[in-house]
Image: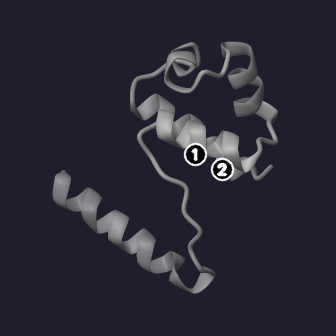
Amino acid sequence: MNKSLLQQIKKRRTQLGLKQVDMQSRTGISRQQYQKLESQGNPRLETLEIIAAGLNAQLMLIPDDKVHLIRQLLNDEIKVTI
């Protein structure tokens, strides 16, 4: 599993002020399973969709040639909210 994705999942969870144990009520995934997934997991797509929903987020496939546009948009949004 891409470590970057696992790091993004953890980052989003902490941004929401959630602990790993909180994810059980949001996803139905036990704390132990979630902890393993976040540290070394190789989740199925369905599991990633469940986790994304529990984090009030969505999974998206972004073409490589458009990633810079998404990053720019997100950076501009951050500047506006600060």
Question: Is 76 situated above or below 2?
Answer: below
Color theme of the render:
one colour
Q: Circle 1: is it few (<14), some (14-19), or many (20+) Cα within 10 Å?
A: few
Q: Which residue is mark 2?
A: 5
Residue 49 position, x and y percent, is 59, 45
Q: Secondary structure at mark 2?
A: helix
Residue at left 77%, top 41%?
43
The amino acid type found where label 1 is placed reads Gln
Dot 1 and dot 2 residues touching (CB under 8 Å) = yes
Residue at left 40%, top 24%?
17
The amino acid type found where label 2 is placed reads Leu
Image side of residue 9 versus residue 40, left or right: left
Q: Which residue is mark 1?
A: 8
Residue 70 found in image quarter: bottom left
Q: Nearer the viewer, residue 64 or 61?
A: 61
Q: How far apart are labels 1 and 2 at the CA level? A: 5 Å
Residue at left 34%, top 64%?
75
Image side of residue 31 versus residue 80, left or right: right
On residue 81, which mark appears? none
Residue extending furthest toward the bottom:
65
Residue 60 position, x and y percent, is 54, 63
Residue 57 position, x and y percent, is 45, 46
